[in-house]
Image: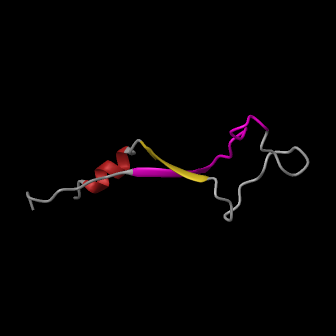
Amino acid sequence: SKDDVTAVSTAEAYFERPIQDRQGRPTYFNQNRLEKASLLNPYWQVRLTNNSALAVAESNGP
């Protein structure tokens, strides 16, 4: 109906571990190699991204 309101948002999850801690020391593990992402790690983050034209078109309906 004409009274419907639709909101569309798109997000992406990414893994980012700080290069240095608060004292400026490197935060590398595994013999000075960068740590690989795993689902058990707390450094997963999310950010909003631009909506694709397809997502906007789908939200408008037929």
Residue name at image x 74 percent, y 34 percent: 24
Q: Which residues are magenta?
A: 10-25
Q: Position of residue 49 (x, y in %)?
A: 44, 43
Specify the quadrant that holds the N terminus: bottom left
The residue nearer to you, when weighing 44 against 23, is 23
Extreme-bottom residue of the structure: 40
The residue nearer to you, when weighing 1 against 33, is 33
- Vertical side of 51 occupied by 4: above or below: below
Q: Please say whether residue 39 is one of the residues in the magenta stretch.
A: no
Q: Position of residue 45 (x, y in %)?
A: 56, 51
Specify the quadrant that holds the C terminus: bottom left
Q: Position of residue 3 (x, y in %)?
A: 8, 58
Residue name at image x 23 percent, y 58 percent: 61
- Vertical side of 33 occupied by 3: above or below: below
Extreme-left residue of the structure: 2
- Vertical side of 13 occupied by 32: above or below: above
Which quadrant of the figure has residue 34? top right
Q: Please say whether residue 14 is one of the residues in the magenta stretch.
A: yes
